[in-house]
Amino acid sequence: MSNALTKGLVASAILASLAGCNNSDNDAAIAKANSCAEAGDACTRFTILHTNDHHGRFWKNSKNEYGMAARKTLVDQIRAEVEANGGETLLLSGGDINTGVPESDLQDAVPDFIGMNQIGYDAMAVGNHEFDNPLEILDSQRSIANFPMLAANIYKADGTRYFDPYKIFDVNGLKVAVIGLTTEDTVKIGNPEFISELTFTDPKVEAAKVIKEIQAAKTADVILASTHMGHYARSLHGSNAPGDVTLANYLETGALQAIIGGHSQNPVCMEGSAYADFKPGDDCVPDKQNGTYIMQAYEWGKYVGRADFEYFNHELHLSSYKLIPVNLLKKETDAQGNETGAEVLAGEKIEPDAALEQLLSYYQEQGQEKLGEVIATSDGLLDGERSNVRYKQTNLGRLVAEAQRSKVVADIGVMNSGGVRASIAAGEISYRDVLTVQPFGNTVTLSTMTGQQITDYLGPVASIQIGSGGYAQITGVKMSVDCTAQTVNINEINGKTFSASDSYTLTVPSFSAAGGDGYPVIEPQQTGYVDADVLYDFFKKQGSIVASDYNPVGDIVYTNSDSSDGCLITP
């Protein structure tokens, strides 16, 4: 028996065996295949298709993976199949259409919303990155969209909601309500300049309120939520705001039949109460908590989630679920399971929709041209030369750390020097320069720690030896580093006298937070801000850069080292 067939049978067995079980971590109660047939005309079939965390990926990548034109072909095929079998389809987005790819960012995600119109989205949750721009741009995006943006827990200063809280769809005669909810972390990771007039309430409380309203009006047979809150198994959300699992368990059992989510950017495919080791083309069992199915389709349109539902006896049953890869590649293996070094399609080849590809190609070309845009000027060299930035504090290394620190209003900025890939010459600075300096697409993370925790964290970080990509460029702190003991003595943070018991905030790239370059592994808040976008915004806001403003000023003193610029201990 092949591995693929074995996986399929195992997944089917799991789904079938969980029918009717009461498993709080993953109760995937899925109806038998003939149940709807037995119900006859009393059964309604419908399919939910979903994506989330698009982040500007309207165009395929360099390997021809994903892209909205191929997504349209896939969605059209599924719609036709479902309709031929007497069903109807809803297409939902879990939000974060904005921020991530310069060709999209430079055009305010206009091509992305146009693409969503062409594909035929029915509704979307509002993501925190929809607030990365002034509200005028968000309002313009709303005017472009031929579908509602939903968020029940975002209020204006006058006490009214900024978006519609929900929408009711007629699906084959079945009334399906879709509630929108946005992470309350938007207050902490959003740009205060743009959201200061808005209030983000607790989505759990708001969901209960809206569900009660819908139930009292008797306007819906089924209540779903399209959320941008994140899925955290067993509600272990760390520094992040509570997500979909917490939401499902807060509500009355079964009050919300399904959550179609986003924000955490993970494929929600479960093995019991833990995440499965999911790879493109694998079977996927969604989560189920307190009578609520919970789904998420990773990120960027890499997958289209497909949930086939059957409704009978006033109950909603999930008959099948898939995460369908959109031209994703996987590593090829031989008959013995050894990797050959080649890459092959994880699923069937999906031809891009020709009309949409032609339409979006115009915006892709426009975006490429805009990469030459001059966004700032510098009166001197910004030094990111490998032989310098990995050996001492440089003005560009510190500028990048400062850009990330200021983006989220943190006390301390830490940047691994391996993430600074080039210098910027004196004169004009273009977006292309930014991408040359920071090409990896890491994101900025935010951590809140006590002074003692900051001390414990910076000890090993600041002690990483010079010459390594882990050598830390640091702003916002005055301290001495004992390179032998790998400890720090902090005098001042963000201009204030240090206290071990006070609370401070710190930014590090996502790569470093995950343990890259030997950094301690931490579980920070994921802001979602891409490093190159942050640097772009910083340059554009400053306009004119005085290179010497970012020169090291002796804030960090290295002791017990053979170098005054960092830790170097020679035998």
Image (cartoon, rainbow, N blue to C red):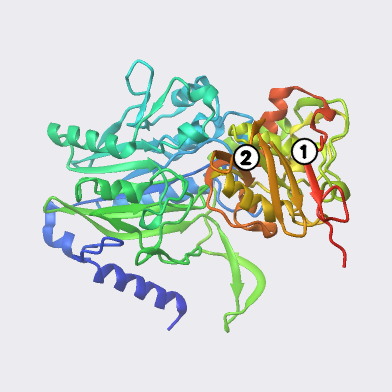
| Quadrant (top left/top right/bottom left/bottom right) for the N terminus | bottom left
User: Could you say where residue 41 lies in the image, as x and y percent from the top left?
Assistant: 12, 52
Task: Identify the residue at image location x=82%, y=40%.
Answer: 394
Looking at this view, is 434 or 460 the one in front?
460
105 relative to 296, above or below? above
Tag 1: amino acid: Asp
The residue that label 1 is drawn on is: 555
Which quarter of the figure has residue 506? Answer: top right
Task: Identify the residue at image location x=46%, y=34%.
Answer: 186
Looking at this view, is 406 or 56 the one in front?
406
| Relative side of 291 to 284, left or right | left
Separation of marks 2 and 1 at Cα, in angstroms? 35 Å
Which secondary structure lies at badge 2?
loop
| Relative side of 370 to 57, left or right | right
Q: Is residue 102 visible?
A: no
The residue that label 2 is drawn on is: 101
User: Could you say where residue 210 lies in the image, as x and y percent from the top left?
Assistant: 24, 34
290 relative to 169, above or below? below
Q: Nearer the viewer, mark 2 or mark 1?
A: 1
Which quarter of the figure has residue 487? Answer: bottom right
Tag 2: amino acid: Val
User: Could you say where residue 289 lies in the image, as x and y percent from the top left?
Assistant: 28, 55
Which secondary structure lies at badge 1?
loop
